[in-house]
């Protein structure tokens, strides 16, 4: 019944950390019973800060790409909470259904209980399609904007909220 929730997303885009930053994270102490990871995975990308998650709906299937994206991103926000990282930074999700590309923004909202949060998704926002040159260039333009955001605002957040946590105290 929950077979779809047991998979990872198809693609992700994350930051390329410097060797010093990776060394810092590799030596880091993570929450008890939590994998040595800054994200929701314990695989080879466990020390890569991910900011765009992409799920492709396979042709001739009934699967909704948002089911997998929501499960994957919820796991990321849970990992943030377990490790004590800020929940304030949103994450982008891209659902590709055939030729249509749609963008979602996932963010947390803290209710009255300080220990809890609610995960919200804004969207879908049309990114373009692969049927026309104009649609393809529209997709590329959005991806470039997301990349600039990742290298700017998101990287600043990673430095402040994650990397700073593992720096040696002098």
Image: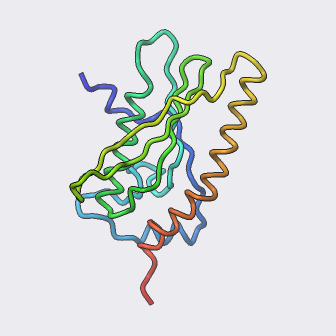
Q: Provide residue 128's location: percent of width, then percent of height.
A: 66, 25
Q: Position of residue 145 (x, y in %)?
A: 67, 45
76 horizontally vs 55: left or right: left
> Which residue is at the front of the view, 45 or 9?
9
Quarter of image, res 152: bottom right
Q: Quadrant of the N terminus?
A: top left
Instruction: Give the residue drawn at x 47%, y 73%.
Output: 164
| Residue name at image x 32 percent, y 62 percent | 83
Q: Look at 41% across and 53% down and name the residue there.
A: 39
Q: Quadrant of the C terminus?
A: bottom left
Q: How many numbered discs sit on the rendered protein?
A: 0
Q: Nearer the viewer, residue 169 or 93?
A: 93
Instruction: Tell me what residue is drawn at x 46 percent, y 54 percent.
Output: 89
Q: Is residue 133 above or below residue 49?
A: above
Outermost residue to the bottom: 170
Q: Quadrant of residue 62?
A: top left
Q: Is residue 94 left or right of residue 136?
A: left
In the image, residue 170 sits, relative to residue 157, either above or below, namely below
Q: Is residue 35 above or below residue 61?
A: below
**Which one is in front, 30 or 95?**
95
């Amino acid at each position: 019944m929950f077979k779809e929730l047991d998979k990872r997303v198809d693609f992700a885009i994350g930051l390329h950390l410097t060797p010093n930053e990776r060394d810092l994270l590799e030596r880091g102490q993570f929450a008890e019973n939590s994998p040595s990871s800054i994200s929701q995975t314990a695989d080879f990308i466990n020390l890569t800060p991910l900011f765009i998650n992409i799920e492709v709906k396979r042709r001739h299937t009934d699967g909704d790409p948002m089911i997998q994206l929501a499960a994957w991103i919820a796991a990321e926000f849970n990992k943030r909470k377990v490790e004590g990282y800020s929940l304030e930074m949103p994450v982008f999700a891209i659902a590709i259904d055939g030729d249509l590309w749609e963008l979602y923004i996932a963010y947390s909202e803290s209710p009255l209980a300080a220990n809890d949060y609610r995960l919200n998704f804004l969207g879908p926002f049309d990114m373009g399609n692969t049927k026309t040159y104009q649609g393809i260039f529209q997709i590329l333009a959005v991806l470039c904007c997301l990349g600039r955001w990742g290298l700017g605002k998101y990287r600043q957040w990673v430095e402040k909220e994650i990397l700073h946590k593992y720096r040696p105290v002098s």
